[in-house]
Amino acid sequence: MPQAQAETVHSFKDVSANYDEAVSFLYEFEIIKGVSSTEFGTYKPLTRGDAAVILANTLFLDTESAPDAGFTDVNSRIKGSVNALAEAGIISGVTSTEFKPNDTLSRGAMAKLLTLGFELQDYAVDTPFKDASGVFKPYINALYGAEITSGKSKDTYGTQLDITRGDFSNLLYRTILFADELYYFPVIGSYNLTSPTSIDITLTEAVPEEWNAKETVEFLQFSVQLKDGTETIFDPTAYRLSQDRKTVTVEHTTYDLTGKEGTLFIDDFENVIEIPFNFTTAAAADASLQKSLQNMPATTGTAQ
């Protein structure tokens, strides 16, 4: 996962120093947006609908093919996120047909989303919070045990209070950093451009046995900038892991580079790998492939 950024990367005028690192991180990686181009809405309460979109983005959930959760009050902007979270067992509605996307999210409900989303249940410990009770207690205990939250005061969590957009950003950011130390994330070590429609990507660590090639590649983002400035984001069409589980072969037959010249970008959320290519002629193609074979560790850019 990406590292914390030391500099502000947004134009929001209402983000103080206490929130800037988290908001900059989440904004840079397109996890969160502002309420306008200059206002983040730091002290405004977060709605259930916006929370669903943010969390689904964070967890890279498939928001397009998730089955309909049956909520009749969600619009097209949030429907896919809610469906994906419901399928994963992370979120539920107020009733079987109502999600109430415009209702505000409580701090207790926020604890449930983060705990289930990042599977933090095993970190639960007793807390000093007198208001940590009811259905949200185990989730508050988990965030406290993982040292993600310290509450509103030494003995109050603020379970029933609305979570603000700023506080949610801080807690989500801390949760991501905590998870980064626990879970596997693919990081590119080197690459080999093998054809106009395929590339071998060698990772710094072997992919865990419980991961398949598709799940690994879903953590990478692929795009191309052609010589004329045209930019295209594309998805791979096929992928397979090597026997040692360190190299993944990616095919992109729906975006063929034959006859094109430019730069292929692969973002592993820690680095952006820049791979120049020229497939306009046979000779140029051979040169591109030979140059790719000679590449050293593929950390030629910084994640944007």
Image (tube, helix red, strand yellow):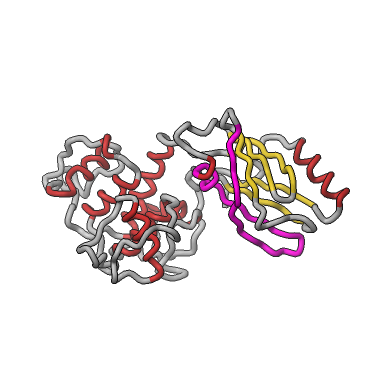
- In this rendering, is residue 76 above or below 28? below
Residue 200 horizontal/vertical position (percent)? 66, 40
Between 230 and 80, the one lying in front of the other is 80
Residue 74 horizontal/vertical position (percent)? 32, 69
In the picture, measured across the screen, residue 79 lies left or right of residue 161, that is right
Outermost residue to the top = 244
- What residue is rendered at 44% in x and 63% in y? 33
Q: Quadrant of residue 124?
A: top left
* Magenta residue check for 304: no
- Magenta-tinted stretch: 215-242
Between 247 and 269, the one lying in front of the other is 247
- In this rendering, is residue 37 above or below 174? below
Residue 267 horizontal/vertical position (percent)? 58, 48
- What residue is rendered at 30% in x and 40% in y? 120
- In this rendering, is residue 226 above or below 197? below
- What residue is rendered at 42% in x and 36% in y? 183
Between 109 and 86, the one lying in front of the other is 86
- In this rendering, is residue 24 above or below 123? below
In the picture, measured across the screen, residue 285 lies left or right of residue 144, that is right
* Magenta residue check for 224: yes
Residue 283 horizontal/vertical position (percent)? 88, 48
